């Protein structure tokens, strides 16, 4: 057997490095998430990764050790290894070996039999442009060293194939009871027993294709680059680019998704004829080096056939691994937006309405979520992303817009998006990450056929979908958002507050089709009050639906789930909930009326101040301007004290919640977040400042002895609504919940108002 001195893993150095990386990781802005749901880490032997940043070469070994407490070998560029160098000793200690190490594959094969795992980057270098599809539609990458496009290196697939041949050789010797030979192999590998050797030889070698996806890719300057520039007279362009991109990946909030695919077992690709030939060949070969050099010594016809077959199988498995690796990209919004932009440019589009672009993007995201074999970034699984795309408030889209505008690839004035000439320019391999992130994103996902299908559907359908379909999409988004919020705020950390709640009514938004004999063209949006949920308006909604109207009960953010959810929300979030409810109805109806109770009434009036195109009328029931409880004046003071206490002591604040004695405990939260009360005060102030802008027909209904809202509020609100002539109806009641309890015919007043508005619209149409 051929023996050579091999670098050994230093377990102390390895363990120290893992601990050090864990400490550093907690201080960085990178969020590493491993997706390996089918025991790939445990069952895999050779792990293949794509390569986009220098530091990512340390991550897989760290994760594998964290998962299985096993050591990894990794293959690195020979430039890092110098004889007698301390850094070289360190690299050897943590399992790294040079790609020019003599008999490298034999060494790695033995390491697998010893129980270690192997990490390989088969692209051979950092693929800065992420282009993996050639002009001919084949998988390949650009190699900066050879300055040409080529396929992946075949070392990993050859390693797996030859190792399985070696295992077959050992198993043959075991069947023949060649104990001396088996013991020699055992000693060479440093294994404690022949039984352990045989056990490992019975397991097929598994290659695990894996993909590392970073999101987002930022190109603005960062602290690392600026610090180096201060101490460097001249920074090369390539080095500046490295610091810019990789500094942002490390130091800013970046998701690093590592996704492992289905393991590839090389023996499954051997035909029966292959097995016959290989079985004959290995009789004349005694060690791994002989197997890896198969065909080079020209020792016979059978061996030459075996060598050709081995080469074909090597290429075949390499191509399968490439395809799987690139199919594992974690798709995010920037992938979608970049691919859409390049499609539009190919179609000759230089400028597009931003609202149209966002609508296509929204549809693409929805369609993509239904494609099989697609791996979506968690932001694309969130209804927040879908919903906020519609009005352009999506954080992910705004980040993409800022980054691409900074790169001078496109410009946006909020109304239109223009694609700039630089977007169409060719960029060198080394600077494309910095100059054209749109190209980098689009290249990374170019092989995902499901993405192409989703984009085609969205481009084809965005102008042709019926209003009912858009309405259904928007309603599904709201249901999804509710379900997700309820799940997120049902975890043990919120248990103390949640277990004290008394609300039992369903807090989900509802959409009622017209159930009457007459079908109306007008739709009605219902907006519930503070601490409640759509259930508060359900009874009224059913009465309205019986008259032939479509009715949607929107859910204000933070409501119907947990007081802890409400504590995180602002009045702007509540107003967006009203706007989204309006979208549900305006997509399928020509006319919309908004009816809000209490805080919902204030939101309805504030929403009406923007004068939406299809809004016909507003009914505000018990809208607050002044409150009976004068202690609310101190809420801002308590809120700011809470913030200060939380900042100083990382505690929940001096008074985070106030217990609520509700009229309807089966609907309302029992605990009021002080922050939410503060937001309510801000909302009321905002409403008051905008009352003069409301020009829609308006009805104000108020209980004459309301126990929560000062009955004088209705008249004060009416006096400031100078652009319309509101009608006020005072109903006898000493309770606040006049809609839910239908006190003194409140619902009948609402229904009469709706019928009156509908009658006017019908008359105008005729």
Image (cartoon, rainbow, N blue to C red):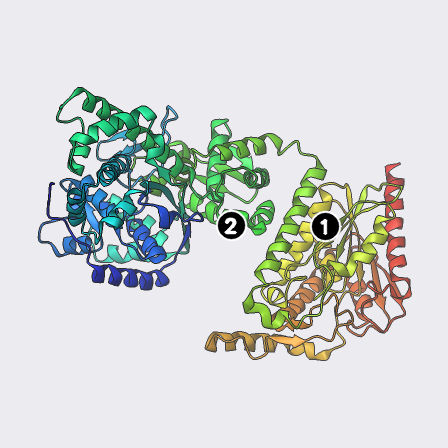
Q: Around disc 2, counting alpha carbons within 10 Å, would you say few (fewer than 14), some (14 to 19), or many (20 or more)?
A: some
Label 2's element?
helix
Coordinates of residue 644 in the picture (x, y in percent): 51, 76
Q: Name the residue under label 1.
A: 611
Secondary structure state at the residue bearing disc 1: loop
Percent position of residue 254, x then y: 41, 53
Cβ–Cβ under 8 Å for marks 2 and 1: no
* One can see residue 131 in this view: no
Which quarter of the figure is the N terminus placed in? top left
Q: Is residue 589 left or right of residue 543?
A: left
The residue singled out by tag 2 in the image is 379
In the image, is 80 to the left or to the right of 225? left
Q: Residues within 10 Å of mark 1 (few under 14, many from 20)?
A: some
Q: Which of 549 and 276 is in front in this view?
A: 276
Q: From what the image shows, is residue 74 above or below residue 601?
A: above
Q: Name the residue rendered at 11%, 41% in the picture.
A: 2
Residue shown at the point (8%, 53%) measured from the top left:
84
């Amino acid at each position: 057997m051929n023996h050579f001195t091999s670098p050994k893993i230093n377990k102390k150095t390895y363990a120290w490095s893992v601990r050090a990386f864990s400490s550093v990781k907690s201080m960085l802005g990178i969020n590493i998430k491993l997706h390996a749901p089918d025991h790939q880490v445990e069952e895999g032997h050779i792990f293949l990764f794509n390569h986009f940043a220098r530091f990512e070469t340390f991550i897989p070994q760290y994760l594998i050790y964290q998962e299985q407490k096993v050591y990894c070998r990794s293959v690195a560029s020979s430039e890092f290894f110098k004889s007698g160098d301390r850094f070289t000793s360190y690299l050897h200690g943590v399992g790294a070996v040079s790609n020019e190490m003599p008999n490298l594959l034999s060494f790695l094969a033995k390491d697998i039999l010893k129980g270690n795992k192997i990490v390989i980057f088969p692209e051979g270098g950092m693929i800065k442009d992420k282009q993996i599809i050639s002009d001919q539609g084949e998988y390949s990458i650009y190699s900066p060293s050879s300055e040409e496009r080529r396929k992946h290196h075949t070392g990993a697939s050859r390693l797996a194939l030859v190792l399985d041949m070696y295992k077959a050789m050992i198993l043959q010797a075991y069947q023949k009871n060649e104990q001396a030979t088996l013991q020699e192999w055992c000693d060479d590998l440093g294994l404690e027993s022949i039984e352990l050797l045989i056990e490992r030889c019975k397991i097929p070698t598994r290659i695990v294709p894996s993909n590392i996806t970073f999101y987002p890719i930022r190109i603005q300057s960062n602290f690392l680059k600026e610090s180096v520039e201060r101490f460097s007279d001249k920074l090369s362009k390539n080095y500046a680019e490295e610091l810019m991109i990789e500094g942002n990946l490390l130091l800013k909030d970046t998701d690093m998704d590592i996704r492992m695919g289905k393991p590839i077992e090389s023996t499954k690709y051997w035909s029966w004829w292959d097995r016959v030939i290989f079985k004959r060949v290995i009789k004349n070969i005694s060690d791994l080096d002989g197997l890896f050099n198969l065909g080079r010594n020209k020792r016979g016809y059978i061996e030459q056939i075996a060598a050709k077959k081995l080469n074909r199988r090597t290429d075949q498995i390499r191509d399968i691994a490439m395809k799987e690796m690139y199919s594992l990209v974690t798709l995010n919004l920037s992938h979608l937006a970049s691919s859409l932009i390049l499609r539009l440019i190919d179609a000759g589009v230089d400028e597009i309405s931003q609202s149209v672009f966002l609508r296509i993007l929204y549809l693409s995201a929805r369609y993509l979520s239904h494609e099989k074999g697609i791996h979506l970034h968690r932001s694309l699984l969130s209804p927040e992303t879908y919903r906020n795309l519609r009005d352009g408030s999506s954080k992910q889209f705004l980040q993409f817009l800022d980054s691409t505008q900074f790169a001078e690839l496109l410009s946006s004035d909020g109304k239109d998006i223009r694609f700039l000439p630089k977007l169409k320019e060719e960029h060198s391999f080394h600077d494309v990450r910095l100059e054209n992130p749109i190209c980098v994103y689009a290249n990374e996902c170019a092989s995902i056929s499901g993405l192409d299908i989703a984009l085609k559907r969205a481009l084809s359908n965005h102008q042709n979908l019926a209003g009912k379909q858009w309405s259904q999409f928007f309603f599904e988004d709201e249901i999804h958002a509710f379900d997700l919020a309820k799940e997120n705020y049902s975890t043990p950390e919120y248990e103390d507050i949640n277990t004290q709640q008394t609300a039992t009514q369903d807090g989900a938004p509802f959409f009622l089709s017209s159930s009457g004999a007459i079908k109306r063209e007008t739709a009605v949006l219902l907006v519930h009050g503070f601490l409640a949920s759509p259930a508060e308006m359900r009874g009224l909604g059913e009465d309205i639906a019986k008259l032939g109207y479509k009715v949607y009960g929107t859910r204000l953010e933070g409501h119907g789930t947990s007081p802890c959810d409400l504590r995180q929300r602002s009045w702007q979030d509540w107003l967006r909930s009203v706007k989204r409810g309006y979208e549900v109805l305006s997509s399928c109806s020509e006319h919309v009326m908004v009816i809000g109770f209490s805080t919902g009434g204030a939101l309805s009036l504030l929403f009406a101040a923007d004068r939406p195109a299809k809004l016909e009328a507003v009914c505000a029931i018990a809208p607050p301007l002044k409150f009976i409880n004068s202690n609310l004046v101190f809420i801002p003071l308590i809120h700011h004290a809470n913030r200060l206490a939380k900042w100083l002591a990382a505690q929940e604040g001096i008074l985070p919640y106030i217990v609520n004695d509700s009229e309807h405990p089966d609907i309302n939260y029992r605990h009021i977040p002080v922050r939410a009360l503060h937001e309510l005060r801000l909302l009321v102030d905002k409403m008051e400042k905008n009352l003069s802008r409301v020009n829609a027909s308006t009805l104000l209904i108020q209980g004459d002895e309301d126990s929560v809202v000062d009955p004088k509020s209705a008249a004060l609100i009416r006096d400031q609504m100078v652009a319309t002539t509101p009608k006020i109806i005072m109903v006898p009641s000493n309770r606040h919940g006049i809609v839910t309890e239908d006190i003194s015919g409140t619902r009948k007043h609402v229904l009469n108002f709706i019928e009156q508005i509908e009658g006017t619209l019908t008359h105008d149409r005729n």
